[in-house]
Amino acid sequence: MVHSRSFIVFLCGLFFFTSCKKDPAGPGTVKEFGLESPFYTFPASHSFYYGTLLWPEDGTAFWYGGHGLYGISVPDGNATNTDNQPGYYAAYEPDSETIYYLPTECLSGCTAPVFKVNIDGGTPERIPDLEIQVSGGSPIIPVSSNQLLFVKLDPQSSVLSTYLYDQASGDSTRLAEGIPETLSPNRSEVLVYQPDETVHTEEEDIYQLAFVSLDGTINDTWQLYSNSSAHLPLYPPLWDLNGIRILYIKRDFDNNARVSLWLNHYPDSQEEKLWETSGGPEKTIEGPFRWSDDNTRLAFWERTCLKATLYSCDGGYQWTLWVYDTMKGEATKQVVDNSDETNIARDQRFSSDGSQLLLLYDRSLYLKDVN
């Protein structure tokens, strides 16, 4: 069933953010608000365009990017580079403590093998007979220690489709047309971004978000709109940790193109507006979006163009990290970044009790109390 209420949802499956060259006359490069000294700084020679920050337990953090797997103890900063092979689009499977990744810098339009490595290090292992299509979304989604969701071209229809791979048998099963975005917390459903052929027109591209069980059953669909370049996907919807609400962003073109953050209660499609930017088209909401373990706090970034022109941003960006408290119904500003650094990864993870943030920021790791 397609819900009668439709959503302008902005989707993206990448682990990095695009910035632009800063105007030398712009604001300074001081990181202003709420940070002490970092407890670890990565080598300046390392690429930070892509990567994934993991904090599966409060004692040790892991970073997988262009220079391999790092394990960094928190907060004393002792680091070990346990695997020097670059890894992109990394995904973590907690039961087996395994990181899956692609050894390629390709962002779209290519195929790549899949490797895995334990978070404690060791020799990376290529998964036999598995190559996936890199085309946005989340190209690797671990389901269990034995199963992976991935995307590839269907050999019969030549369209991108979501498949389930079984490592024990080596078999791949097609679940649905479209690109996988995110797995439900109970690992029973995957959200798949797909064209809605029932309402597609030449003037307007209509897409839908399908709720697909791991046996291929489509349980529900929500209609999404993408009409011309003004509606290009920006960030994927995300389950809350209870599996009953889905987070996404919308841009209201009838209200100065203001961006807002929403929760939708699944499956009854009851929308709840959490927060919106204070400006117009020069501001947007960016990920990564991270929930605290108790599901009451949400960390995300707001990006502001400091000098917008008609088609681009010529004055650099300001990045602001916010934490939204669902119990209080308010967001608090955590960090403001006026950095000259461009195209570098930012990420954050809550401690197990939700009182602290582990923050990857300006090529360094910080541990800060949540204001």
Image (cartoon, rainbow, N blue to C red):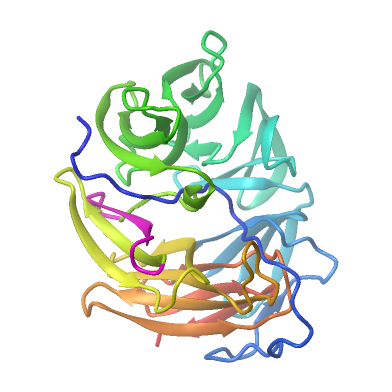
Residue pictured at 22% horizontal, 80% vertical: 328
Q: How many marks?
A: 0
Q: Between residues 297 and 343, which one lies in front from this camera angle?
A: 343
Q: Position of residue 332 (x, y in %)?
A: 38, 84
State the residue lying farthest toward the right: 45
Q: Position of residue 8 (x, y in %)?
A: 36, 50
- Classify residue 123 by image quadrant: top right
Residue pictured at 30% horizontal, 38% vertical: 223
- Classify residue 192 by image quadrant: top left
Q: Position of residue 278 (x, y in %)?
A: 39, 79
Is residue 299 rendered magenta in the image?
Answer: no
Is 361 placed above or below 193 here?
below
Q: Between residues 366 and 16, which one lies in front from this camera angle?
A: 16
> What is the magenta range?
241-256
- Classify residue 28 by image quadrant: bottom right
Q: Between residues 86 and 23, which one lies in front from this camera angle?
A: 23
Q: Quadrant of the C terminus?
A: bottom left
Is 213 placed above or below 321 here?
above
Q: Is residue 11 visible?
A: yes
Residue pictured at 60% horizontal, 47% vertical: 90
Q: Position of residue 348 (x, y in %)?
A: 51, 69
Image position of 247 (left or right of 32): left
Residue pictured at 51% horizontal, 15% vertical: 171
